[in-house]
Image (cartoon, rainbow, N blue to C red):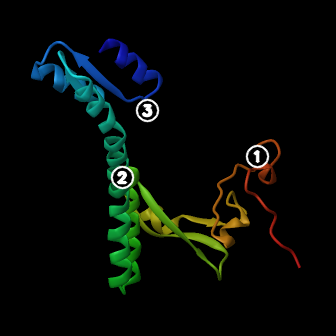
């Protein structure tokens, strides 16, 4: 088990089947906690070993599918909210709540572009003081690239060598 633990540290995606002469439930529990996908006790037949090893890919697929489905649940809930909510503030608050829940962040703010003023303003937030929410404004080009106009927000630090145009994903705004 120590060897498997060391292997998992180096390559977490490694799948193992343990073969042991001890049929103790404690060992099976420990093996499961370590991530072993199968458990075979001695004496065993070739058929039993084959079954234990054959179950591993199917089990791994189920685990990945489970993770994928769990990740989709919040998106499904958010989609239901989009379809049933007509109040914009309620909708934005739901987006912020979902972002906080999924990222496990302490503070979340959703800033939207005020096209008339050319600045980003906080429209919904969690964990920020009302003063911060109502007074924070960010002009485009003031650290946020013009990419906001294309719904591609990139945070930059203009004082870095190379300036904003050196950042990956930056395309100068169209002129003319």
* Residue 50 locus on image (x, y percent): 30, 30
In 3D space, how far apart are the residues under numbered discs 2 and 3 (Cα atoms)?
15 Å
Residue matched to label 3:
13
Q: Residue at x 27, y 33 (%)?
A: 51
Q: Element under label 1? A: loop
Mark 3 and 1 residues: CB-CB less than 8 Å, in contact?
no
Mark 3 vs 1, N-terminal side:
3
Residue matched to label 1:
159
Q: Quadrant of residue 100?
A: bottom left
Q: In the figure, is residue 15 to the left or right of 45?
A: right
Q: In the figure, is residue 113 to the left or right of 163?
A: left
Quarter containing the N terminus: top left
* Residue 65 locus on image (x, y percent): 36, 52
Mark 2 and 3 residues: CB-CB less than 8 Å, in contact?
no
Mark 2 and 1 residues: CB-CB less than 8 Å, in contact?
no
Viewer-nearest residue: 159 or 168? 168
Residue matched to label 2:
65
How crowded pointer 3 is (Cα within 10 Å; few <14, some 14-19, many 20+) is rated as: few
Number of numbered discs: 3
């Amino acid at each position: 088990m120590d060897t498997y633990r060391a292997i998992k540290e180096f390559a977490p995606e490694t799948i193992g089947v343990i073969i042991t002469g001890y049929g103790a439930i404690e060992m099976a529990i420990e093996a499961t906690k370590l991530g072993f996908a199968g458990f075979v006790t001695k004496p065993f037949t070739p058929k039993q070993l084959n079954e234990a090893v054959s179950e591993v890919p199917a089990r791994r697929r189920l685990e990945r599918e489970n993770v994928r489905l769990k990740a989709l649940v919040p998106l499904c809930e958010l989609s239901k909210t989009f379809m049933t909510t007509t109040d914009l503030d309620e909708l934005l608050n739901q987006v912020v709540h979902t972002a906080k829940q999924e990222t496990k962040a302490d503070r979340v703010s959703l800033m939207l572009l005020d096209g008339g003023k050319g600045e980003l303003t906080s429209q919904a937030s969690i964990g920020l003081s009302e003063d911060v929410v109502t007074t924070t404004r960010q002009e485009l080009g003031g650290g946020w690239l013009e990419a906001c106009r294309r719904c591609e927000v990139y945070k930059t630090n203009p004082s870095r060598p190379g300036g904003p145009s050196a950042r990956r994903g930056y395309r100068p705004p169209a002129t003319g």
